[in-house]
Amino acid sequence: MKKRDLGNTGVSVGEIGMGCMPISVTGRPSESEGIRTIHAALEAGVTLLDTADSYCLETSEMGHNERVIAKALRGHPNIVVATKGGMIRPEGRWECDGRPERLREACEASLRALERDAITLYQYHRHDPKVPFAESIGLLAELRKEGKIVHVGLSNITVEQLEEANAIVPIASVQNRMNVFDRSSMKVLKRCEELGIAFLPYSPLNGMGKAGQIGENDLLSRVAAEHGISPQQAALAWLLQLSPVMIPIPGASRGVSIASSAGASSVTLSHENMDLLNAAG
């Protein structure tokens, strides 16, 4: 598979990134274990870590995941961190806040938490229906002009929102949910391919707590057995071969999990097995 750099960041499409949310939400490991998990990802060749200021338990902890990542990456300046703003956690709830003033505050707080002068990839987490989409994206364009962010990304968006945002500021990436069982963002993926925009599928193993269930899927298990890999690696390999703009970001709270996931980058599924998995959707 031809590798293409994501906006000169050093991250190539066709590789596995790491979703860091499990390190900071309910059921999370200790901070030291979280740091060990990130280090295991780096040792496995992962060069992109995905986070958000809202990856925490509640409002007073905003930025928890970013701070853990910053500690883990001291001495590793070349690792790309993609973070997000636009969600808040009052009393542990997930709520949108896309007001420009709030997004500016969130970005500046993320800069401090990540201990960086600029954020390589800053993503609008989810559209706030109370705020015109163009106003939220316009603020990200301002932050880009100011040098606080290098690239702008979107998350949980439609094709129409992608078009609207891309007319305001160049969009480098889109992060929507996609996996073998959920292909609801296929139209968004196809538009990303046409525009040359990286696609970062979140929940590529069907979400937290469900990755183990992939092993119970007969088709994935059969494909995995033919290639001598795990069903989870088969699911990630399918995504990687599905599109030339793909960068899956499986979540992990243990080093062994992300090391195994990263191994999917070197797997090539047969045409027959790709056809079988494609048809399964």
Image (cartoon, rainbow, N blue to C red):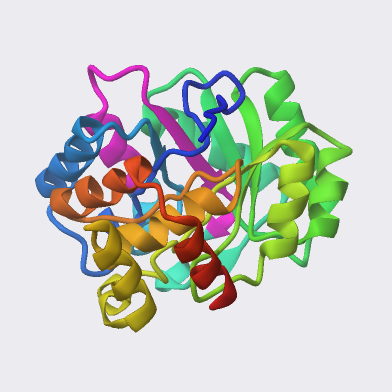
Q: Using the image, determine if residue 6 lies above or below residue 19.
A: above
Q: Using the image, determine if residue 261 lies above or below residue 72.
A: below
Q: Residue at x 25, y 74 (%)?
A: 212
Q: Residue at x 76, y 67 (%)?
A: 129
> x and y percent of residue 136 in the render?
76, 47
> x and y percent of residue 252 in the render?
27, 55
Judge whether residue 59 can be spotted in this image.
no
> x and y percent of residue 198 in the render?
62, 40
Q: Using the image, determine if residue 272 lies above or below residue 181.
A: above
In the image, 117 versus 180, the foreground residue is 180
In the image, the segment drawn in magenta is 65-87
Give left or right: position of 214 versus 242.
Answer: left
In the image, 93 versus 151, the foreground residue is 151
Give the number of callouts. 0
Give left or right: position of 270 versus 259.
Answer: right
Residue 164 within the segment the image draws in magenta? no
In the image, 183 versus 280, the foreground residue is 280
Residue 74 within the segment the image draws in magenta? yes
> x and y percent of residue 167 in the render?
89, 38
Classify residue 216 by image quadrant: bottom left
Give left or right: position of 37 versus 101.
Answer: left
Q: Residue at x 50, y 44 (%)?
A: 247
Q: Residue at x 43, y 22 (%)?
A: 116
Judge whether residue 158 can be spotted in this image.
yes
Q: Using the image, determine if residue 18 lies above or below residue 28.
A: above
Tell me the quadrant of the picture where the C terminus can be found: bottom right
